[in-house]
Amino acid sequence: MYRSLYLPGTSASANLSSAAYTDCNGTAFDVKVTKKINEASTDTQGYVGYSESKKRISVVMRGSMTTAHYLNDIDILLSDPELSGVNFPEDAKIMLGISKTWGSVHDEVVSEVKSLVKKYPEYSLEATGHSLGGSPTYISYVALSQVFPEKKVIGNAMAAYPIGNQAFADFGSSQNGTLNRGNNADDGVPVTIQLSLLRISANTVQNLYATIPGFKHYERNTIVPGPKTPVSSVKANVTILVQLVMGRSV
């Protein structure tokens, strides 16, 4: 199920996603953090926790901050996804950078969510994140839906780029949950940057991936309001990305 309407929950998810960029200990807004994710082999970070006020268990992944993150961002070779508890269609493909990223923490996250579900059986489940954290939301949403079919699952992918082919997108859309894909109208990423060897002009950097043959979003964008990201930091991040693409040192 896909919802294209603006929902207050997307702003709450943006807050949780922003907390993933910090060393949040104990709480992240209304969420009590029970498990911090920090997988060194793939440099993957995030956290799992629960909100008593919303009666919801949340899985939140962090976006790009390091060279390893940007390398995962551009590792677009399509591969066959394999995750415990998830039955992918034979023709579903996802980019290797995200497959490695989520695959390295999948079992750890699922184990923690199972523990919380046992303690709070009436709680719903949420997957969210921004950018490199938003794109794994596409697959964490699928994973939660598949592993916990009896649960209400919502995914809020913020400024997420597509991670797989049409078969994967169709598979994601077929899950018995709700997936919202939102972009912040003032994210700072919607800029036009002129570089010496590459011109980037798009609503969001994530839309660059949508122009690559074989990559498909679940559905359309939802533009949501929110705090602005400094353009200077976006330029720096995109410059790093382009340098990596062009084979230059960072």
Image (cartoon, rainbow, N blue to C red):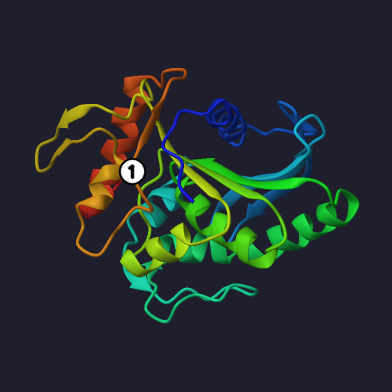
Residue positioned 38% across, 49% down in the render: 70
Q: Quadrant of residue 221?
A: top left
Figure label count: 1
Residue closer to the observer: 237 or 203: 203
Across and down, in percent, residue 30 comes to 74, 28
Residue positioned 38% across, 71% down in the render: 93
Q: Quadrant of residue 189?
A: top left
Q: Which residue is mark 1?
A: 220
Q: Is residue 105 visible?
A: no
In the rendered image, the residue lying farthest to the bottom is: 90
Q: Is residue 188 left or right of residue 25?
A: left
Q: Is residue 153 left or right of residue 25?
A: left
Across and down, in percent, residue 180 comes to 48, 42
Q: Is residue 9 left or right of residue 249?
A: right
Q: Quadrant of residue 194?
A: top left
Residue positioned 44% across, 66% down in the render: 171
Q: Is residue 56 above or below residue 117?
A: above
Q: Is residue 7 visible?
A: yes
Residue positioned 56% across, 55% down in the render: 141
Across and down, in percent, residue 250 comes to 31, 44
Q: Residues within 10 Å of mark 1 (few under 14, many from 20)?
A: few
Q: Is residue 101 above or below residue 187?
A: below
Please name the amino acid that badge 1 sits on: Arg
Q: Is residue 22 above or below residue 58?
A: above
